[in-house]
Image (spheres, rainbow, N blue to C red):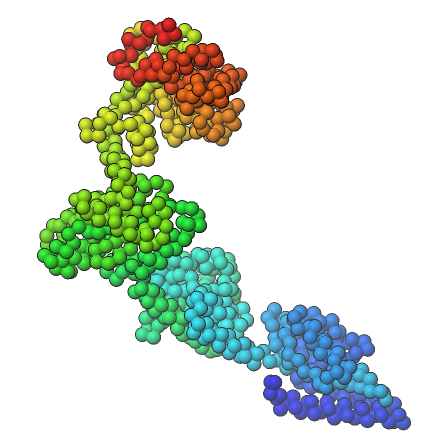
Amino acid sequence: MTKISDKEILLLREIEQLQSDLAAVNRTKEVPTMQLFNSEERFALAMRGASDGLWDWDLATDEVYYSPRWKSMLGYEEGELANSLNTWTAMVHPEDKGFVLKKAQQYISGEIDSFEVEMRMSHKEGHEVFVRSRAFKVTRGSNCETVRLIGTHVDVTRQKKAELFDKRNTKILEMIAKGKPASEIYNEIALMYEERHVGLRCSMLELEGSKLLHGGAPSLPKEYCKAVHGLENGPEVGSCGTSTYTGKRILVENIATDPKWVNLKDIALPFGMRCCWSEPIKNSSGKVLGAFGMYYNHTALPSEEESNDLISAARLAGIVMEREQNQKRIRELAFTDELTRLSSRNHFYLNIENLVKKCARNQRKFGLLYIDLDDFKNVNDSLGHDAGDLLLKQVAQRLKEACREVDYIARLSGDEFAIAVYDVVDEYSASHVAQRCLELISKPVELAGRKFTPACSIGIAHYPDDGTDLQAVLKAADTALYAAKELGKNRYSFYNQELTDRAEYRFKVEQYLREAIEKQQLSLVYQPKIDINSGKIISVEALCRWDHPQLGQVSPVDFISMAEQIGMIKPLTEWVLKSACHQAMLWRKAGFSAIRMAVNISPSHFLESDFIPLIKETIQETGILPSDLELEVTEGVVQTSQENLAIFEHLKALGILLAIDDFGVGYSSFASLKHLNVDFLKIDKYFINDMLTDNKAKLLVASMIEMGHNLGHEVTAEGIEHKEQFSLLQTLGCDSAQGFFFSKPVSAKQMPTLFDRNFAE
């Protein structure tokens, strides 16, 4: 219990004596009324003349007298506040009101022998005041009925704040001892000092390099904290920026006028911040780690108490920051390779174990590259270990450049490294990273004054194909690494040799394709489309071919998809389109005027903004009639978005013919055809192959032909290889057909010999 002051003791003794006099008067019925009145008046005058906070509660009327001192404790003048219990009810803290009234009732009824409580009350300026209240009963009559409670109010805010400060301080020390997150401790430190000073708001900023990073500020607006996070410190950068730069205390009385805040005041002032005092946070050796800031919504310089608290707050925060930096250093030593600054072996194992669990939950794949420098021992032996260390650092930097941002890289030991390639869709993702590693590492480097060209071998394994846990995947990657060494080094190898061969072929295709497209080393062949009723050629489809001196004939399936991946599909499409249209005009000049030219368009290019201008440019350059140009797109591009519909409508407005290629094998055509204005549907070869032997396939072909006609489209069947297929399509009412039965794709020179043939005979 809080110690009672001497002044309170004297006052309470006087009240007890007066209460005793009143009780004696009440017991003596013969005492004149005037004597009773005089005793009560003397009691009331004693109470109301006291200088401490006194109150006198008439239980019958709920009228309460509040002394001037009582009112001034809460910031009010003598003439303010009504003499009513409601005044107290409105000012007491809602959480305290119930138990205070209950305790008063227990005292009045005699359940307890004394009344003493502590409660929180609202000051006129809005903050809380802690009050200790004691009271005595005034009774009357032979039955000693309680008619009044008379008591004192003592402001114990300072003592309570000291108690709360001690509790919070103890809590913070416990949090530090238990290793709680620094951000949580920073918030507790801020709240501890904010409770000591009404209106105060605190913040902690950590210094990383020359940048200030948000540490903790529970009472500051998030928008403000976000704005100052990452701020570069300097000699005139607010209070905290200047404090961390100079290592000295910075006291800004008025943010609006201080030159140090000229570039930051527009951030602070909208949130009511008017002054800011900053103390540098230092470690035990005096190095600046950050800054502790105190803000008020009014202009001011710190009082002696506030100044001392600013110092103590910075020191306490310094303990936390120094601990945090030491722990960070320990983690770095445990999880970071000292030489290369890559992840260490231990951290690598933890990361891959977590990655295995994550991929298992989400049914995802990842690739693992095991990398070993070729002949690294010779570098150490001939040039020395310093040169070897320099090479390892160079290799680490080059490996980081080879990786994507999402990938994870580590140095396992000596000259061994590992890379985890995340979100692998196919084997090409990991092999692409491996190829980049080979290319970057093989660049020359100067070691000990000599030019040296490093090289490495790489083993590639995949989770879960080559192993379903950490050890299994590592073993597979290590096995693949030795395979790469045995094959001659300076290369990569998959755990599965077939994948290695496939990936190497794809890289060769990529390597030569750019040059082939840029130098227009590809060629075009043409396959006719036949009118089923007349048997005559009505159009030809331009098809791209690539015959490379080293690779031989490269399948269009391989190089078209590769052109998409390496961003070369646009120049390839432009070359095919203009070359085909130019050839169509040559045939027209030779007298073959009824032949249309069909060109396949990549779905990705078809939807690009520069596609329509390319078509206009092609028509203008070659002179081809729009009605003689037929563009084929796969049904995967047939979507109902406004952008897609606009492209179709624009092409139709130009007079271009449009065909949906490979119809029936996609997912969107039936839902989208009603929105699109196209001319032809080309039934995919998949249905044609089986329609003679599979009745379901025949029914589907017949349904597609009927549907296409009902929608106003001509229907073409692809992949005709037998006369029986051709005859059945005639019976089903198909409009045109295309396939090896009529002709394989031929060169432009061979094509005129087919124009006059009748394929229906």
Left or right of 288, for residue 14: right
Query: 263 or 185: which is nearer to us?
Result: 185
Residue 436 picture location, percent across and down: 25, 44
Going 33% across and 6% down the picture, which residue do you hit?
Answer: 757
Going 51% across and 78% down the picture, which residue do you hit?
Answer: 166
Residue 530 picture location, percent across and down: 38, 12
Going 62% across and 88% down the picture, which residue do you hit?
Answer: 4
Which quadrant does the C terminus fall into? top left
Residue 644 picture location, percent across and down: 46, 28
State whether residue 621 appears in this view. Answer: no
Left or right of 328, for residue 13: right
Query: 479 or 419: which is nearer to us?
Result: 479
Taking 571 as reference, is 57 above or below it?
A: below
Residue 475 picture location, percent across and down: 29, 52
Left or right of 761, for residue 84: right
Q: Residue furthest right?
A: 30
Left or right of 64, for residue 29: right
User: Where, by quadrant of the figure, is residue 528 drawn?
Assistant: top left
Going 49% across and 31% down the picture, which residue do you hit?
Answer: 641
State whether residue 146 appears in this view. Answer: yes
Taking 245 as reference, is 580 above or below it?
A: above
Q: Residue furthest front?
A: 693
Taking 378 as reference, is 295 above or below it?
A: below
Query: 147 or 180: which is nearer to us?
Result: 180
User: Where, by quadrant of the figure, is residue 314 drawn?
Assistant: bottom left
Which quadrant does the N terminus fall into? bottom right
